[in-house]
Amino acid sequence: MSAEILPVATPRRVRAYARRLLLRHPRALLTALALHGLAAVAGLVTPRLLGGLVEGVSRGEAGIDTAGAAIAAFVIVQGVLVRYAYLASARLGERVLAELREGFVNRVLALPLSTVERAGTGDLVSRSSRDVDTLATSVRYAAPEVLVGLVAVVLTAGALLLNGPLVALPCLVSVPLVWGVMKWYLPRAHAGYLREDASWAVLTDGLAETVQGARTVEALRLAERRHRRTDADIAASYAAERYTLRLRTVMFPVVELSYVLPVAATLVVGGFLYMHDMASLAQVTAATLYTQQLMGPLDMLLAWLDELQLGGASLARLLGVGEAGPDGTGRDGTGPQNAGPDGAAPAVAAANGRQRLAARDVRYAYRPGRDVLHGVDLELRPGERLAVVGPSGAGKSTLGRLLAGIDAPRTGAVTVGPADPPETPGTAGPGATGAGAAGAVPLAGLPLDELRGHVALLTQEQHVFRATVRENLVMARPDATDADVEAALRAVDWDGPDPGARVGSGGETLTPAQAQQLALARLILADPHTLVLDEATSLLDPRAARRLERSLAAVLDGRTVVAIAHRLHTAHDADRVAVVEGGRITELGTHEQLIAANGSYAALWSTWHGGKPAGPDPTGPADPAGHGPAGGAGAV
C-alpha cells in the first residue's frame, strides 16, 4: 500500500499561526520595528540635504562643508541603527524559530503510530529536514529583510509626498506593472512550492525504502523496478522545480523593468515641472534620489518575497502534521471517541489496580471493504498470559495493534476498565465487560499519555537512541532512580555495557538480543498493566529467546501479557492460547485443552515437534464453559 502524504495547513491557518507567534514577543517586535524605522528615517535625510545642496549651488549660496558634515553624521547614525536593528531582528527570529521547531517536534511526537506508518518515512523526513531548513532560512534572513524593506518603502514613500506631491507622482508609473505580475505570480508560486515540497517527500520516501530494503531488493531482483521508481520520482521533482523556476523567469524581468521606469519618469516629469516653475530644483533632485532609493528596498522586498513563499509552504507542511489523525475515531483532531461534553476523555477508574482489556465484535480493514479481522471477541483476564498463534497473514499482529490501542477498530470496540466494576443502576451485571461495562472506555480514545500507562506494544524492531544506557531507559519514566534502572536491567539478565555507557550511533554497538533486552527493561520501568509482545524475540537465536522469556517470568507476574509468537514454546508456557485463522479466533484454551481438542493448534504443535498431526479427540472440548476450543469461527 502506497504511503499517504500528511495534511498541509491552509494559508489562513499559516497566517494566523505566524501572527500569534510574533505577538508572543511584542516587546522584541516593537524594538526591531523602531530601530528599523529610525534607520530608515536617518537614511531619508541624505537625499533631502543633497537636494538642498544642489539648489544652493545653483544659486551660489551652498554651504558645502556644513552639508557634507551633516550627511556624514547621518550616514554614521544610520549605520549604527542598522546594525542594532538587524541584531534585534536576528534575536527575534531565533526565538520564533526555536518555538516553531519545538512545536513541530511536539506535533510529531503526538502523532499516533498508525498515522506515522501510513505517511511513510519520506514525508516526515522531508518535513523535519528540508522544510525545517527552508523555514530557518526564511525566519533568519527573509523575514528581517522583508521587515526592513517594508519600513523603508513606507517611510521613503512618505518622504516623497512631503517633498512634493507633483514630483512624487511619476514613481507610480510602475505600480500597475508590479501589481499585475505579483497578482499572477503569488497564487501560482504557493501551489507550485507545495508541489515541489511534496515531490521531495515522495523522492525521499522512495530512496529510504530502497536503502532500508536493500537486501530484499537484491534477493527478489527488484533493482530495475526501484531504478524506474527513482527515475520517475526525480522526473516529477524536476518538473515541479522547473515550474517554479518558470514563474520566477517571468516575474523577475518584469520587476527589473519596473525599477527603471520610475527614475526615468521622475527625471522627465520633474524637468518639465521645473521648467514651468511648478517645482524647485531641490525638489526634483530629492524626488529623483528618493525614487532611486526606493528601488533598493523594493527590490529587496520582492526578491525575499520568493523566499517567504518557500518558507510559507514549508510552514504549512509543518503545521499540517498537527492536523493528521488516525483512521476511524479518536485522536483525529475532533477529540477522543469517548470524550465527554467538555471534549476530554474520561479517565479509566481503577479497581484495586486491576484492569481488564476486552474486544467485542472487532472488525478492521487496512483498505475499505477488505476486512482482515472479522467479528473478533476476546476478553483478557487480569494477570493472565495469552499466546496468540496462527499462520502468517492470519491477523495476529493486527489484533495485537488493536489491543495496544495503536489502531481503532472499524466496528466494535476494544475497551479497558476495572476488572470488577461496581454495579450501577442501568448497567450490566457483574459479568459484563466491553463497551457497556461500568467504567470501561474505548482504548483508542484515550490520550496517548494515559494509553501508554495501560498497555504497551513491543515488536521485533527496536531503536537504540544515541545516548547512555540509562538515558535510553528513563525516557519511559523520567523519575526512575539508579536503583530502579539497575533492577530493570537485572530483570532482563542484561549482559551489555554499564548504564553510563553511550550506545546507539557513534557509541557501543548492541547485539539484537541486547537491543531487545533494553526495550524490555524500558517496559518494566513504564509499568503498564498490559503488555503486547508481537514476536518480540523472533530476531534472537532460540537459546537467547528462551533465556530472556524465562528471565521475564517473575518480572511480568501480575501483568496481563499478550504474546504473538511463532515459537510454540511461548504458547506452552502461557495460561491460554488463542489460534487466529483467517481474521477469526478459531480456538481458545489452555495448551493441554487445545492439544486434547486435536484441532489446528494440535496440528501446529505436532508439526513444530516434527511429528504427525494428532487424530480426532473423542472426548470433545475440554472446557464446555467456553474456555476450550470454540465451536464456531470467531466465537470465544
Image: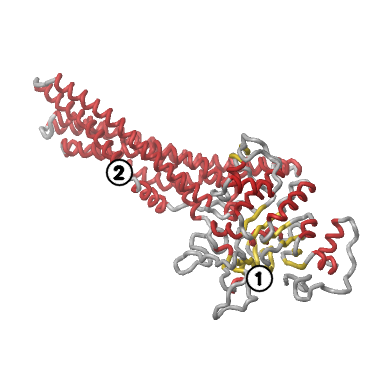
Residue that numbered label 1 is attached to: 361
Quadrant containing the C terminus in the rendered view: bottom right
Quadrant containing the N terminus in the rendered view: bottom right
Q: Position of residue 53 (x, y in %)?
A: 15, 24
Q: Position of residue 547 (x, y in %)?
A: 76, 49
Amino acid type indicated by mark 2: Arg
Q: Position of residue 157 (x, y in %)?
A: 23, 38
C-alpha gap between disc 2 and disc 1: 58 Å
Instruction: Looking at the image, tell me whether mark 2 or mark 1 is earlier in sequence order.
Output: 2
For the residue pair 234 and 331, the one nearer the viewer reads as: 331
Q: Quick check: 555 above or below 371?
A: above
Q: Position of residue 425 (x, y in %)?
A: 54, 80
Looking at the image, residue 473 sits to the left or right of residue 391; the answer is: left
For the residue pair 73 and 194, the one nearer the viewer reads as: 73
Residue 144 in view in this figure: yes
Circle on res. 27: 2
For the point 58% across and 57% down, which residue is it? Answer: 452
Q: Secondary structure at mark 1?
A: strand
